[in-house]
Image (cartoon, helix red, strand yellow):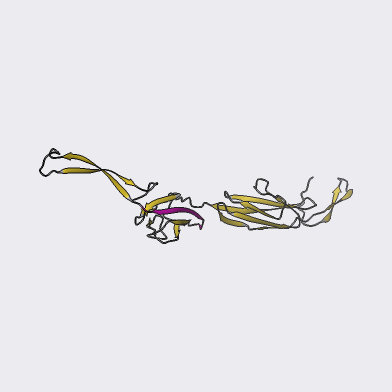
Amino acid sequence: DTTAIVGTASRTYTVTAWSSDGCSSNATVTVTVNPRPTLQVAPLDTTVCAGSVVQLSATSDGTIEWDRSLPIACYDCPQVELIATESRTIAVRSRNTAGCITEGTVVLDVRPRPAVTLPDSIRLCIGKSVHVQPTGTQAAYRYRWQPSDGLSCSDCPDPIAAPNASTRYVLTTTTPDGCTDSDTVTVSVVPCRVSLRSRVDAVTKPVWTCGPVLIVVSIVNPLSDSDQDVLV
């Protein structure tokens, strides 16, 4: 016969076998129960934003073994760092000299950052305004423009910009989960002088007449003296 023993402490067991004629025989077995290594993992569960550096810690009286699929520099160090890219469960174990193992896990919940982008730069003439329109905005996001000088609002996604001088604006966007990201746009203010070319389209009378002459003049095209295209 086979008997299973759940070892909770070291002890010696005695087994007695009886024959049909009443004879008996004894045997003993000593079961040694080795303690498992202690293991404390921190943090147990954590929520972070994508791209954040996560610090993991494992304290044990055994040898640490982090999950080998992790993108970390050291797999037997008590403290490790990794860049959060996706949600996952991270496993860590400790092994002592007796071969006993204790396992622990860290549940990592990674939340996305906002993907709001701005054009690199905008040029406009002095005294004019421009509607700054980022891409990727959402109604649930929170917005903050810095500096707010020359803007119609500092907490909206798409303000009207009318700065008196060239200004570099920083837009910081925050998701409902508290994840943030920033982008910049430079609004360059330039002086603009517009010159006009004209053409005589027609005269109502021959040019050699001595009487009044009606000359029709039309604008061919406006020309900016600036070397760049600007908003006028």
Q: From the viewer's side, name the closer residue of 88 and 81.
A: 81
Q: Position of residue 47 (x, y in %)?
A: 57, 56
Q: Position of residue 160 (x, y in %)?
A: 37, 56
Is residue 56 shown in magenta? no
What residue range appears in magenta?
177-191
Magenta segment's dominant SS is strand
Q: Position of residue 207 (x, y in %)?
A: 15, 39
Q: From the viewer's side, name the closer residue of 217 and 69.
A: 217
Judge left or right: residue 106 versus residue 206: right
Q: Is residue 133 visible?
A: no
Q: Position of residue 91 (x, y in %)?
A: 66, 50
Q: From the viewer's side, name the closer residue of 54 and 200.
A: 200
Judge left or right: residue 67 versus residue 119: right
Q: How many marks?
A: 0
Q: From the viewer's side, name the closer residue of 179 and 221.
A: 221
The residue under the point 46% across, 56% down is: 168
Judge left or right: residue 213 versus residue 36: left
